[in-house]
Amino acid sequence: MNVSDFDFREAATSEFMNHGLGAKLTDNSQAIMRGLSEGTFPEADRWAISFACGSIIERVLWQASGIWMGYFNFVPPVTGSEKEFLGEYAGLLKELEMPAQFQQLSYQLGHLDSATDVSFYRETLPFIPLGRKMPEWFPAFQASLITYELLNEPAITSFFLFLRQGDVEQFKKQMPNPNAVFSHLQDRDFTAPFHADPERPEPVIAGFIRYTEFLSAMDGIFPDIATQSFAKSDQPVPNRIVDRDILFSVLGQYRWRFPRNSFERLHAVLFAFGELAASEFAKYPAMGIQWSFAETYGSILHLSQKFFAEFSEEDFQGEEDPRVIDERQRRRRAIDLRIQALRGDRAMGASASAS
Amino acid sequence: MAQRIQHTYLTLPQHGKCFTLLSNAAKADVKRAVIFIHGFNGSARSTWTDFLSLVDDPAASGDWWEAADLFFFHYQWDSIFRQLTNNALNIYKFIEDIFPKPEIIGRAHAYRSESFEYEELVLVGHSEGGLLLRKVIVEAAERDTAILDFMRDAKYKKQDQPTPEGMLKARLRLFAPALGGDMQSGLVGVLSSLPVVSHALSSSAAKKGMDQGSPSVTEARRRTDRYAEDIWFDCFRAHILWAEKDSIINSEKYTEDKQCHNFPSGSSHTSVCKPTLTYPLPLAFVEEGVDRYECQ
C-alpha cells in the first residue's frame, strides 16, 4: 500500500489551530478576555484570568510538543494580544499558585520578543533531543489531542473552578437538585461557570461527572499495564508500551486545571456525587441496582492521581505496594533505555551528516 | 515492526462534534468507510478510545484499517428513546453524506478527489447507537423501491434477490446494543452508564426496569426481522459482541443476528467497545465480526 501525497503535517497543524483542541483553547481564552474587558466576572475575575492564561499556555505547550516530535509544522507561539495579556497577568499566576512552569512561561511569553516567533520554542522549551521525527508516537498523540478536547467542555470547568476556590463547608450544606445537575450537564457556554452561583453544588457535580468521563477516556489511551511478565522472561518492555510512557510523561500541560492541595475539595465532591447517585438509584427499586460506591471511589481516586494530582501519603493513609514501586522502576529503566536509543539515532544522524 | 500507514484527524465543523480520521494511504488504496455511533451518555470522543490510535498500531490491528477512513458521529446524549427518531434521521443523513462519496469532507478534497467513492461500508454502534443503526437501516430499506417491489412481489412469485445499494451495503458491528429494552433515561441513566459506575454495578441491576414494549424498540426489531427473513443483505444481520457483566441492557439479539459466543473477560457495558493496548478484540471484531476466532 502506498502513502498519499498530501501533507498530513500541514493538515494536522491547521486542524489543531483552526478547529481542534488548539482552537478550543484559543476560543475559551478569548471568551474570558472579552468578558474581563467588559467586567462580566465581578466575583470570579482572578480565576477567570488564571483560566485564560492557563488555556493560552497549554496551547503553546501542545504546539511545542507536536513540533518536537514532528507532528506539527512550526507556528508562532502566541499572538500580540495574547502576549500582552500574559505579560499583564504573569505576576497573578504566582499568587494563584499556578504550576511553576506556567508562571515562568507566562512571564516569558509576556515579555520576550521571541514570543510571537517560532524561535521561542528552541530558545525556551527544553525537550529531550530526538534524532528524528517520531511517527510511531503520532497516533497516541493525536488520540490525546482528540480526547483532551473534552476538558474544554463548559460543564467540566465548573468542577475545576470549585477545586480552586470552592468553600467545602458551604458545599456540604447544600442538597443538590438532580434535575439541575442534569440541566448543567448540557451547558454549552464556556464562560457560564464563571457566572454561576458559587454556593450551588449542581454545576460542580455536573462538571465532576464530565471529569470522570474524561478520566476513563484517557485511561483507554494510557492504560495501566503490568510489565512483570517481561521482567520474568528477560525480554525488554516493548517500545509500543514505553513510547506511551514517554508521551504520557511529556503531556502534562493540561494538569494546571487541577490545583495542588485540593484533595479535601475533591473528596467533598466525590461524596456528594456518591450520595446523589445512591439516592437516584434508590428512586428506581425496580431496576434492582446494586452499586459498589467503594469501587467507584477507588477508581476515581486512582485515575485522578494518575492524570492530575500529586496527592500526599497522608491523603491516602497507606504505604505503596512494593510491586507498584518495582513496576515503576522497571518502566523508568525502559524509558531511559529508549531515550538513550533515540539520542543514539541523533548522534548517528549527526555523524552521518558530518561525514 | 514496520511502520503502519496512519490516519489524520479532521474535524467536521458542519456536524458539530463529529470528526473523522482519514487514512494517509494513497486514494486508490482506500476502500472503506467505518462509521461509529456512540450510545446513551457517550460521545464521539470518549466512547471509542482507543480506536483512535490503535487502528495505526500493527501489533493491535490488521492492515485492513490502512484502507479505512473512520467517521465518528456525535449526537445529543440525553436523547434515549425520546429523540430516537430524530437522531436516527440525523445519522441517516450523516451516513448518506459519507457513503459512497464522502461529500462530508468537502473542504478536505485534497485527500479524496471529486470522483472518489468507497467500496465498502461498516457501521459500528455501541448501546443506543446499535438501536439507532437498526432504525437507520430500516429507514434506508423503506426508501429503496427495489426492496419495496421485491417484498411486495415475494408473496406471489419467486424472484431474484435485489442488489444492495447505498447504505444497505453496510455490515453492522454492534457492541452491547440496546436491542432488548429501554434503559432508564434522565440522570439515573447518565449515572449508571458512567464508566466509573458501570463497572461497579452488579450484573442484575437496571435490566428489571426496562420497558421492553416501547414502540421504538419493538418496531425496529419487527421490521428488521421481516426484511432479514426475505432478503440476504448483511445489513439486516448484525454481528454482536456482548459484555460479560452488563447491567444496562438486555442481551437479546434479533432473529438473524450473529453473536460472539465468548464474552470478553471482565468487560462491562461501557468497556466492551473500548480497545486498549491489552484488549485489542474490538478492533478485530469490527474488521471480522463473529468470524474472529475469539468469537467461535
Image (cartoon, coloured by chain):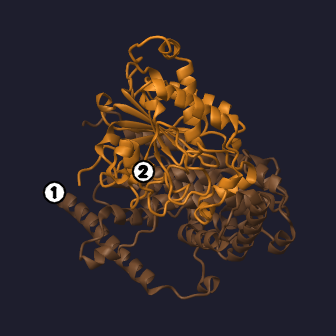
Chain colours: A brown, B orange
Location of residue A3 in the rendering, given as x and y in whole percent from the top left corner: 28, 37
Q: Which residue is mark 1?
A: A352
Residue A137 in percent (x, y) is at 37, 55
Asked whether, in this view, residue A64 is left or right of residue A314, the answer is left
CA neighbours of label 2 inside 10 A, class few (<14), some (14 to 19), many (20+): many
Q: Residue at x 35, y 66 (%)?
A: A242
Q: Chain letter of disc 2?
A: B
- Between B243 and A262, the residue placed more toward the observer is B243
State which chain disc 1 sits on. Answer: A
Quadrant in the rendering for residue A230 = bottom left
Measure the alpha-carbon separation of dots 2 and 1.
43 Å
Residue B51 is labelled as none
Residue indicated by mark 2: B282
Classify mark 1: helix, strand or loop: helix
Query: Label 1 neighbourhood size at 10 Å, few (<14), some (14-19), many (20+)?
Result: few
Q: Is residue A310 visible?
A: yes
User: Is B26 displayed left or right of B179 in the figure?
Assistant: left
Q: What residue is drawn where x is 38% and y is 29%?
A: B120
- Contact, CB < 8 Å: mark 2 with mark 1? no
> Could you say which quadrant of the image residue B215 lies in?
top right
Where's the N terminus of chain B, which quadrant? bottom left
- Give the camera-side residue of A354 and A207: A207
**On screen, residue B292 above or below A240:** above
Location of residue A243 in the rendering, given as x and y in whole percent from the top left corner: 36, 62
Q: Is residue B277 above or below residue B285?
A: below
**Horizontal and vertical percent position of residue B220:** 60, 33
The number of numbered discs placed on residues in the rendered structure image is 2
Residue A49 is at least partly visible in this image: no
